[in-house]
Image (spheres, helix red, strand yellow):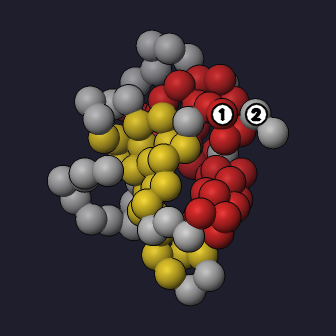
């Protein structure tokens, strides 16, 4: 996960194909990324959505996205997490 900026605000990365963000879980900061595909399949993001729309959809789903990120990070012990659609299937 390489982002040009280290920020706590979500930002688009991978040519707009993912949103990078951070969460704190178990007292540690976890760098996370959710793919556009996951946002399209589980958060009603349209395939032709603008950058602003992607970030709004992320913000609307942030509570659920954060919960899944924390679950994955706790289970794996990872400090970097990539969320694809599969993580939301359960």
Quarter of the picture containing the C terminus is: top right
Residue 90 placement, left or right of 45: right
Residue 76 placement, left or right of 9: right
Residue 45 versus residue 13: which sits nearer the camera?
13
Quarter occupied by residue 41: top right
- Asked if the residue at tag 2 contacts the one at tag 1, i.e. Cβ–Cβ closer than 8 Å, the answer is yes
List the single residue furthest toward the front: 76
Number of numbered discs on residues? 2
List the single residue furthest toward the right: 90
Element type at mark 1: helix
Q: Is residue 70 visible?
A: no
Up the image or down, 88 lies above or below 6; here it is: above
Residue 66 placement, left or right of 2: right
* Residue displayed at 41% across by 37% down: 18
* Residue displayed at 48% across by 35% down: 35
Q: Is residue 4 visible?
A: yes
Residue 17 versus residue 60: which sits nearer the camera?
17
Using the numbered discs, state the Cα–Cα distance from disc 1 to disc 2 in whole angstroms.
5 Å
* Residue displayed at 56% across by 86% down: 27
* Residue displayed at 45% across by 68% down: 79
List the single residue furthest toward the top: 48
Q: Position of residue 14 (x, y in %)?
A: 29, 35
List the single residue furthest toward the left: 4
Bin the neighbour count of mark 1 within 10 Å (Cα to Cα): few under 14, some 14-19, many 20 and up.
few
Give residue 89's mark.
2
Element type at mark 2: loop
Q: Position of residue 67 (x, y in %)?
A: 70, 59
Give residue 86's mark.
1
Give residue 36's mark.
none
């Amino acid at each position: 996960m390489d982002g040009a900026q280290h920020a706590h605000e979500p930002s688009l990365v991978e040519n707009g194909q993912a949103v990078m963000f951070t969460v704190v879980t178990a007292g540690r900061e976890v760098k996370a990324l959710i793919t556009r595909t996951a946002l399209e399949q589980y958060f009603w993001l349209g395939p032709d959505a603008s950058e602003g729309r992607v970030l709004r959809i992320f913000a609307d789903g942030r509570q659920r996205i954060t919960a899944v990120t924390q679950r994955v990070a706790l289970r794996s012990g990872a400090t970097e997490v990539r969320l694809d659609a599969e993580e939301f299937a359960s």
